[in-house]
Amino acid sequence: MEWKRLKARLLEAGTVRLSGEPAEPYVSRSAAGPSAGTPGSLFFSPGDGRRVRVGIDERSSIEVVHRGGGVADLLIDGDVVAGRLEPAALHCPRQAYITVSGTCIFCCRYCPVPDLPGRRKGIAEVVEMVASVADRIDAIAITSGVASSIEEEEAYVLEVVAALRPFKLPIGVSIYPRPGTPARLHALGVAEVKFNIEAATPDLFSEMCPGLSWDGVWESLSSSVALFGKDRVYSNVIVGLGETDEDLERVIEDLAAIGVIPVLRPLTPAASLAGRPRPSADRLIRLCEVHENFLRRARLDPRRALTMCAACTGCDLTPGRDT
């Protein structure tokens, strides 16, 4: 099975059953987003620099058999695929990807974080976390919920970023922005930003993210491109919220036209969307081809990413990396 098809099938399924030798060093757990509060996930790689992240669920029809030392076989649809489990430094391979505030005052319909007993990490704690993996990372990525207000959260994240500068690693930041956020992050030396429009249309955004501003995120994305440069500004767009393929094609084209690289994130059913289906492998492959075409026309290349999701690629079909 070709890699693109295999990865799309795994993203469609979302989970694997883990068996074989103990594999705790290869299991990652999330403090934010739709995977927060789950039994964990793992990164499977065929060994050529490509990878996929899947949740762990003993009820899954797909199995990963850990043979020991990271060597693993993937048993899927009658095929056996040899590969390796990649250890996550913090949340993903080769990065310290840290959620600063694992709690949020907003209630996006796909996100379980507001219902979880999350907390805010102290600045010294974040620095110590990065120091503990500094010998096996190439980048630092910071994301956060909104613990008390958008303004207060940004101010705290700016303090965290300032404290991490001595590591002299590229830092990527993904927070909910307000006017001036891109300039303040840029002034601290942040390498890349990811401000997420989440939904393919403004109506869907209003439905899924009550209390947040679609236009405000777009304004921050637009102003970021001139500051951070080509291939340094990203935005998650969730696939599976009820949009059409035409909606997604339009938003991919619109983002690419202003110099923003979309990250097409398959829905992980959670919170009030727990009953929704994950997008099909066929749909993900079809959208990836559209995605790749629009990026090529705009001369944008996610392979140049230094931090965050586009550098990891575990959760998405990434043009240039998976195609």
Image (tube, rainbow, N blue to C red):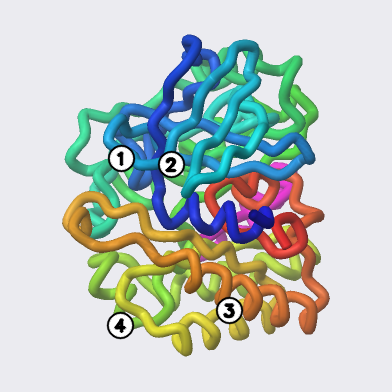
Who comes first in sequence, dot 4 or dot 3?
4
The residue at which mark 4 appears reads as 203
Which quarter of the rendered picture does the C terminus lie within?
bottom right
The residue at which mark 1 appears reads as 147
SS class, disc 4: helix
| Residue 294 falls left or right of residue 155 | right
Who comes first in sequence, dot 4 or dot 1?
1
Q: Nearer the viewer, mark 4 or mark 2?
A: 4
Q: Are marks 1 and 2 in contact (CB under 8 Å)?
A: yes
Q: CA distance from mark 4 to mark 3?
A: 16 Å
Q: CA distance from mark 3 to mark 1?
A: 30 Å
Give the magenta part as a residue range. 179-195
Identify the amino acid type marked 4.
Asp
Residue 205 at least partly seen: yes
Identify the amino acid type marked 1.
Ala
Identify the amino acid type marked 2.
Ser
User: Where is residue 180 drawn, in percent x and y?
Assistant: 56, 61
SS class, disc 1: loop
SS class, disc 3: helix
Who comes first in sequence, dot 3 or dot 1?
1
The residue at which mark 3 appears reads as 252
184 inside magenta stretch: yes
